[in-house]
Image (tube, rainbow, N blue to C red):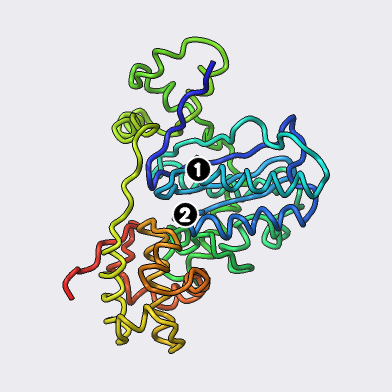
Amino acid sequence: MPRGPRLDTPRALHHVIARGIERRHIFRDDTDRTDFVDRMRRLFPDTGTALYAWSLLSNHAHMLLRSGPAGISKTMHRLLGGYVTTFNRRHHRCGHLFQNRFKSTLVEEKSYFLELLRYIHLNPLRAGIVADLDALTRYPWSGHAVLLGRSSFVAQDCEFVLRQFGTTLSAARPAYSAFVEEGLHQTDPPDLEGGGLRRSAGGWEVRQRITRGRERWAFDERVLGSSAFVQETLATTHDSSTRRPTPPDPAIIDALCRDVARRWRVGAAEVGSSSRCRDVVIARALVAFISVRRYGFTQTAVARALRVSKQTIFRSLVRADQILPLVASDITDLLPDDGAVRPPQTAA
């Protein structure tokens, strides 16, 4: 029986799990882990995929992602497919590495974002890979240390996550750390498995056609959320397997470039140049960050619009992670508390 279509829309939140076939190790050493992390570092910003939480264990990997314009399937196929090719060549093996297709659960953000963030980052501790919370803060193969400022990872959207815990880094990081620690003492942890469709019987037309076998329970696991969330999601996911996402308007970058350049008192043409003037560099980094992380442009599209190299945009994204906590107050209208970006003024 063919598998049910994956649920996805641009900007949808997903809990993704990639497991090794027959529970075999997908990471044999730190070279494997480094290769996987490097692929995330390049791929997620380039596809406009926001990464909030992640952890690598021996035989599986967890990620909390917000899909970009290309969708979760294409993005994950690029990540996992490229990794398998290198893994097989390096370890002199052939054949499948991952168990079937990766599992993705469409998540109701308001109810489950923080719980999944904590659950994913506590995985190495609960699996016995690290001994305690202190060791977890030094574990290099998850996003926990990144959120605490112990390491840097350009593909992870720390700014969005930490804004859920405080308005400044000095307040947000301790609050996040305390929230994670509280998870170790939960007496009744929330159910983070999918099953929203099961809770909304009759709400999905496809459900009526899946009546037996493995695909019945697999279909039920595709959503984590309330019945109301399932019904609301249906309107945007019903034809997603045949509908191509509409790419964002390139004029947005031009307008954003003028807006940010005005605030940093530089010329818009300078932002789209190789100038290394400090204020120009900051403006370029912000334009790149907002274009890729919020509007969903690829790095290639931003590089083309600014008439610079793709490598320049990549460096700008790295720089943006470093400077955003320092300049966020100057762009609060572009980065409001709900995480969405308001379109800049289009007037010259």
Which one is in front, 210 or 172?
Answer: 210
> Contact (CB < 8 A) between labels 1 and 2?
yes
- At x 33%, y 65%, the residue is 335
> Which image quarter: residue 147?
bottom right
| Residue at the spot of label 1 | 74
Residue 15 image position (x, y, % from top left) = 52, 41
> Which image quarter: residue 269?
bottom left
Taking 212 as reference, is 323 above or below it?
A: below
Q: Is residue 8 left or right of residue 25?
A: left
Mark 2: amino acid: Thr
Residue 340 image position (x, y, % from top left) = 32, 57
Name the quadrant of the N terminus. Answer: top right
Q: Is residue 182 left or right of residue 347?
A: right
- SS at mark 1 in the image: helix
- At x 30%, y 85%, the residue is 267
Return the mark for residue 47. Answer: 2
The disc, 1 or 2, on the residue closer to the chain's N-terminal end is 2
